[in-house]
Image (cartoon, helix red, strand yellow):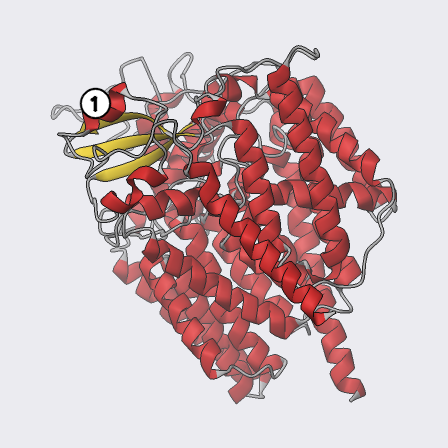
Amino acid sequence: MRILEKHKLLFKFFLLFLILFIPWGISSSSPSSDLAFIDINTVGMFQTKTCEYSLSSVIFENLNNQELTILPDLNSKLECHGRINGADYLLGEVKLYIGTNPNIDLLVQTIFWLLIMWLIPKTKIKVFKYPNLTSLVLLILFYIHLNGERNYYEQYFRDFNLEISFDNYWLLSILVVFYLSTVLITDFISTRFYNILNFLPYLFLISGAYNSFNLNIFLLIFSTLGIYSVQERKVNLKFSILYLILTVFYQFNSINNNVFFDVDKLKGFVNSSQSSLSILFWSIIYYLMTAGLIYVVNESREIINLELLKSNFLISGAFSVFFGLLSTINSIFSFVTYYYLGLNKFPMSTLTSVEGNTWRGIAPSAEAFGEFYAFVILFTIVLAVYLKLKITNIQIFLLLINLFGLYKTNNFAAMSMLIFLCLILLLQIKTRSIKQKILGIFLILFTGITSLLQVSNFNYEYSSKALIYEGLMVSDIEESLAGDQWGRSAIELANFGEILKLDNPKISSSLLLVTKHYTESNNLKFLPNSVSLISAFSVPINRSEKWGIFIAKYDPGLNEFLFGYGPQQIAKYYQENLTVVNTGLVLPHSSLLSYLLFFGILGLSSFFIFLISIIYKHWDEKVFVFSILYIFVNLIKSDSLLYLPNFMLVVLIMNFYKFTEIVRDYDNEL
């Protein structure tokens, strides 16, 4: 039996080897001595002889080529996959374009990731009902997705055609490959269902975003589980009915505008359109994905291995740093890392931080990964203190690597919150008196806030109006405003009341509301204006400009303010109310603001009520409390919930009390 298992393992590694090299190793031309170092002198050959030479044919001569950048060419023919399909020379840099085809991408990336996941130890088999029906449902959703986001795919796929016909080989091949992928996914989750949570941390290493599709392998895996949870009636019925009503509302409220929104580093987890079909797809897939994750949590709660979970967090964090460093060596490693780890965007090509600030490695967002590294460190410490899980010498080494990753991301908020909670943890251990604990917490908060204000050179007079100032500065106000003799405008002079005198000020409804509240509301004695407080808070955490832009762009109607635009729907917010800052990916820079866009003020309020209630009920579960407090504070100023790994992490943390309760009860029995 053991020999058979070894043979299976060797076979898996052999398949991995084939998938790693075969797609990039086939050339139409015989090996040529001309394939030497690629620079300004040789780049012309690849501009004329396209689709002839494979990537592997130029690798060894260019391992140390620092001028070379390898990029995928999504708009290539099937026969050009893995071959050089063009080249450019610009500003001392050679850009080599490697052909990638959606059919091959879908098949190769899915098989590669599932082979990696098949290395996860098996558990008892989880039998699912109607697997063929589940695959069919996912196939229908996939077709809806292609229709809803056709503008995204038409710019990449030259043969894009969604007509259902036996002559439409492009669509038939895509649907067949996708269906086979769902069958493989079901086989994986049925044999390793109870181990999925233990290995969830590796989402931060293998992101799982497809090269050619605005989809993610883990989105498909947990949506599959979500369908099974519905079949087994393991979902909350009241919540499901409420969500169904919201989905219907989003459909009626959609304007069926087939615009294109460049998802960029959010690829695989955000809608690229605002068509009714795309909103329908993301509404359904978001529900299924969340239901699937909660389903796994509830079914695995009694057999979760927190020691293994901790180790995997540490290993995943350390390997993400390692691959981030490896990708800086040359563009070949960078391309392979991007493709096979399913990254949302290419890794950093250098160890030097962006503008001397952050280094993100393989992550799409330095801020999101900084939160992850800090959480790994906090989680390890809290488990050691409250559940007595020892930290081994190897784990100390891994902790140091994660600490290095945190340092390179330069996430000040994550670092500060980590230090703050570690001090609170120390206070909990060393003091028993409630008065001493309260006094200690007050002193820590006072010291932290004072230090933050000193570092940011805080000035309340400026800070209290910075939010409105930033919002008005990026608004496209065509009418001239009164200024002073030195040419400074009313906005620069903070005379915001001048905006309200305009007959039809072309600013967003949210910015107009905030400006009115700031200028016209009566302040209570000793109590500052609420807008002033939020604005003052935004300055020391470096969010006044970002949140000001958000307010300038956020222009909802009443229904949208109450219920939102729909899950993963940014396009309407981004393009409906244009500002002078409308190039690139302008995000809200707060997960709370992002979810205000998705689910409105009622949805956000419901989330707060739910969060407060579970913290109150499970205050004694310290692993849960420390984790949820850490992550919640960071969500105020980061967009991390827009990234699938961070979203999964937050949902997992919100269910930590289900695991630690069982561990505590078991320890009490002993």
Residue type, numbered disc 1: Gly
Give the left or right position of residue 170, taking residue 526 as reference.
Answer: right
In the rendered image, which quarter is residue 44 located in? top left
Which residue shows up at 56% across the image and 80% down it? Answer: 384
In the rendered image, which quarter is residue 147 located in? top right
Which residue shows up at 78% across the image and 30% down it? Answer: 136
Give the left or right position of residue 388, taking residue 61 as reference.
Answer: right
Decide: is 622 above or below 217. Answer: below
Q: Can you see residue 215?
A: no
Residue 30 placed where, x, y %? 33, 31
Quadrant where the image shows the N terminus: bottom right
Residue 408 placed where, x, y %? 32, 59
Give the left or right position of residue 222, taking residue 109 as reference.
Answer: right
Residue 184 placed where, x, y %? 70, 43
Residue 320 placed where, x, y %? 43, 58
The secondary element bearing badge 1 is classed as loop
- Tally the marks: 1
Decide: is 566 above or below 660. Answer: above
Q: Name the outermost residue toward the front.
A: 30
**Is disc 1 surrounded by few (<14), some (14 to 19) or many (20+) residues within 10 Å?**
some
Give the left or right position of residue 1, taking residue 263 as reference.
Answer: right
Decide: is 665 above or below 122. Answer: below
Which residue shows up at 70% across the image and 52% down it? Answer: 610
In the rendered image, which quarter is residue 111 located in? top right
Quadrant where the image shows the C terminus: bottom right
Q: Toward the viewer: 571 or 350?
A: 350
Which residue lies under the disc numbered 1? Answer: 483
Q: Toward the viewer: 365 or 13?
A: 13
Q: Toward the viewer: 361 or 562?
A: 361
Q: Toward the viewer: 307 or 553?
A: 307
